Image: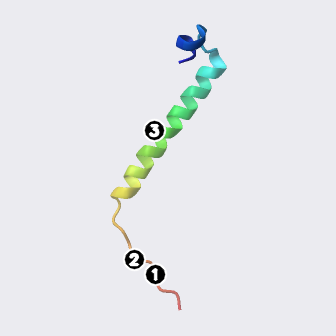
Amino acid sequence: MAWLVFGTFPDAWALTGIIVIAGSGVVLTAYERWRASLPQSEPAAVD
């Protein structure tokens, strides 16, 4: 995006940040899909 708008390519630190942010979104999505596939359990009653 920056390359198209500003005409400069992001440096190594910017690319690292982009990869970390995009990677965390992928991991979070995969985790939430896995968690949603687990059977729902009834909460235990506490006396």
**Camera-nearest residue between 5 and 30:** 5
Left or right: 24, with 11 as reference point: left
Q: Give neighbour class at mark 2: few <14, some 14-19, many 20+ (Cα, 10 Å).
A: few
* Kind of residue indicated by mark 3: Val
Alpha-carbon distance for marks 3 and 1? 33 Å
Who's the residue at 38% across and 52% down the image? 34
Marker count (numbered) = 3
Q: Give the answer, above or below, for where 37 lies relative to 3.
A: below
Residue at far top of view: 7
Residue 44 numbered mark, or none: 1
Q: Earlier in the sequence, mark 2 or mark 3?
A: 3
Say what amino acid the circle numbered 2 marks.
Glu
* Image disc number at residue 26: 3
Observer-nearest of 5 and 8: 5
Q: Are marks 1 and 2 in contact (CB under 8 Å)?
A: yes
Q: CA distance from mark 2 to mark 3?
A: 29 Å
**Looking at the image, is mark 3 or mark 1 earlier in the sequence?**
3
Q: Is mark 3 in CB contact (under 8 Å) with mark 1?
A: no
Give the residue furthest to the front: 5
Q: Which residue is mark 2?
A: 42
Q: Mark 1 to mark 2: distance in Å?
A: 6 Å
